[in-house]
Image (cartoon, rainbow, N blue to C red):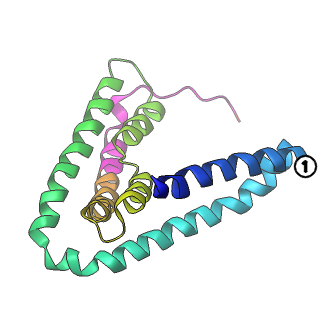
Amino acid sequence: LLSIAIYVALPLVAGYLSRKWLIQAQGEAWFREKFLHVLTPITIIALLITLVLLFSFKGEVILGNPLTILWIAIPLFIQTNLIFWLGYWWSRPLKLSYEDAAPSAMIGASNHFEVAIATATMLFGLSSGAALATVVGVLIEVPVMLMLVKICLATRHWFPAEERLPA
């Protein structure tokens, strides 16, 4: 309970209060146009540092337990593909354009491992099986999503083109 308060509640409250204070002090336009542009690279760097730490802690486990990794990877592969194909296929009878169908299916199929990594490490620690599953998830999701992007590009003719306004 203490780790949830420290790692979830405290940053949430701090983020809310700092946002409110910054908007009052500098205005919403400054917050969106200046502050968020500075903050975005920091969040990406923090996620990359977390991934490097996880991989450094789990590298030996991954290399030493290929069967365990396979048992984690198989359901993730199936789940990602199943959800993608459900979303992509149902986009056709709904007459969605390719520009809506492809991102919808991709977002639906994404496992949002950045959230899973944060949750697993907060609740169970870096050396836990949950942290291992999130590391394997990242290793699996990236190539699977790239494969699904190729499929989307190859099947874009299945969908009506979105009408574009002249530039």
Outermost residue, front direction? Answer: 2
Quadrant hosting residue 20: top right
The magenta stretch spans residue 2: no
Q: Which percent across, then down, holds residue 91?
A: 36, 25
Relative horizontal placement of residue 150, taking residue 53 as reference (left or right) = left
The residue positioned 64% from the left and 65% from the top of the image is 41
Q: Secondary structure at mark 1?
A: helix
Q: Which residue is mark 1?
A: 25
Closer to the camera in the image, 57 or 107 = 57
The residue positioned 90% from the left and 50% from the top of the image is 26
The residue positioned 28% from the left and 28% from the top of the image is 89
- Mark 1, other Cα within 10 Å: few <14 / some 14–19 / many ≥20: few
Q: Which percent across, then down, holds residue 123?
A: 38, 57
Relative horizontal placement of residue 45, taking residue 4 as reference (left or right) = right
Q: Which percent across, then down, holds residue 165?
A: 66, 28
The quarter of the picture where the C terminus appears is top right
Outermost residue, left direction? Answer: 67
What's the magenta region? 148-166
Whether residue 110 is situated above or below residue 157 in the rendered picture: below
The magenta stretch spans residue 159: yes
